[in-house]
Image: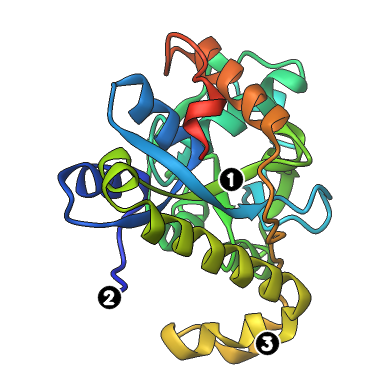
Amino acid sequence: MTIETGGGGATTVPRIVSGELDFAFGNVVSLMVAREQGLPLTVVANGMTTTGDAETDYSALVVPEGSDITAPAQLQDATVAIDNLRNIGDTSVRNSVRLDGGDADHVDFVELAFPDMVGAMDNGQIDAAWVVEPFLTIALEQGATPIAANFVELDPELSIATYFTGDELIASDPDTVDAFTEAMNASLVYAEEHPDETSQILTTFTEIDPELIDQLRWPRFETEIDRGALETVADLMVTDGLIDSAPDLDTFIR
């Protein structure tokens, strides 16, 4: 088995469809957009789920220290950084703005890499940023203030990202797909039951400061995908014009 790094669902989806990759990891919005476009791919295992707790979730919408913005509704006409447009970031942030009574259609989203977001806030390039760990902890240490837990507010049982494959592989080699699903589910159970060991694995393939690891917020590693939460995501995507209609979850998830 060979493991490769990728740039998220937007870049891995074409590699799955072309057969270059057998399995990949991507956020649920990218996958629903791909299905809307007729691309033959299917979810085969969960990846990570929000904690469901605004105080402990690994994702947040933050503003720089001393910002006049104190709530999501105030992001109307503001500039907000996300890592990819038309994705789980802007979909969930728009939802937080709407829930707070703001006009989500007038938020200016810009693409930035997560490591660049804190600096962009500090120099006034952007008004707010959506960050996930480890960049959330780094941002908070540098004075940023969280104003929304966008994943939790979307749905406390939200599966943010999943593992997926192409329908051709499912048809030609279902045993391999079954084995992959079984292995990933086992790994999710182990990660959930051994959080300390799971966190230390980061030191084996990243250059993250070991002292930072104990401060990080982690998602839940659930084996089950909450379909009600995905239906909520799909409805928001229809509202935002990302897709015309919600996908059939019975065929979207294997």
Residue holding disc 3? 197
Compared with 49, 254 (above or below) is above
Could you tell me how far apart the alpha carbons at marks 1 and 3 are, in whole angstroms? 22 Å
Q: Which is nearer the N-term, disc 3 or disc 2?
A: 2
Residue holding disc 1? 160
Classify residue 84 as left or right of residue 151.
left
1 vs 2, front mark: 2
Residue 57 lies in what quarter of the image? bottom right
Cβ atoms at labels 3 and 2 below 8 Å apart: no
Rendered residue at 72%/77% (across/down): 215
The numbered mark at residue 2 is: 2
Residue type, mark 3 in image: Glu
Classify residue 41 as left or right of residue 88.
left
Rendered residue at 70%/23% (across/down): 73
Other-residue count near label 3 (Cα within 10 Å), few / some / many at <14 / 14–19 / ≥20:
few
Classify residue 123 as left or right of residue 133.
left
Compared with 116, 101 (above or below) is above
Residue type, mark 2 in image: Thr
Other-residue count near label 2 (Cα within 10 Å), few / some / many at <14 / 14–19 / ≥20:
few
Other-residue count near label 1 (Cα within 10 Å), few / some / many at <14 / 14–19 / ≥20:
many
Closer-to-camera residue (178/110): 178
Whole-percent x, y for residue 63 in the image: 63, 46
Whole-percent x, y for residue 193 in the image: 77, 75
Could you tell me how far apart the alpha carbons at marks 1 and 2 are, in whole angstroms? 24 Å
Rendered residue at 36%/20% (across/down): 36
Whole-percent x, y for residue 104 in the image: 59, 17
Cβ atoms at labels 1 and 3 below 8 Å apart: no
